[in-house]
Image (cartoon, grey):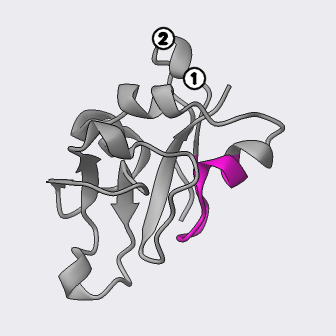
Amino acid sequence: MQCRPCITIGVTCPLGCADWQNENCAQVCSSHGLKCSADGLRAVNSCKILKEKFPCENGCSESFGPDQPAYVVPSALRMHQPGVCLVNQRGDMFSCDGKHPNTRRICTCT
């Protein structure tokens, strides 16, 4: 599943997405010759923006973790909320290095 094309949101564009789960934003941005912006992750931490990049077929949920904001892949176990987009509720947990076996990240690259 590929992400939808980049959307312009002020200075946070270009946006990228991890093509596979368990990829971090540092890797995603680096693969495009760019660097991840942790501050940019705060700017895209909303259900509205996640839905512009991922299907979010089961809606959005407030959560927290260094891999968020993110999309839970449909193949994840039910306890991980497959098809849900996760909005990070912990301001201290935005990280370019976070990753999880069941999520695909939305990334802000500069």
For residue 88, the mark is none
Residue 77 appearing in the image: yes
Give the x, y percent position of residue 74: 35, 77
From the image, tell me which residue sits under label 2.
10
Give the x, y percent position of residue 84: 24, 63
Q: What residue type is labelled 1?
A: Cys
SS of the residue under disc 2? helix
The span shown in magenta is 17-28
Residue visible at 41% across and 42% down in the picture: 94
Residue 4 appearing in the image: no
Q: Which amino acid does label 2 sit on?
A: Gly
For residue 13, the mark is 1
Give the x, y percent position of residue 78: 21, 85
Left or right of 28, for residue 39: left
Question: Of residues 68 and 13, which is closer to you in this image?
Answer: 68
Q: Is residue 18 magenta?
A: yes
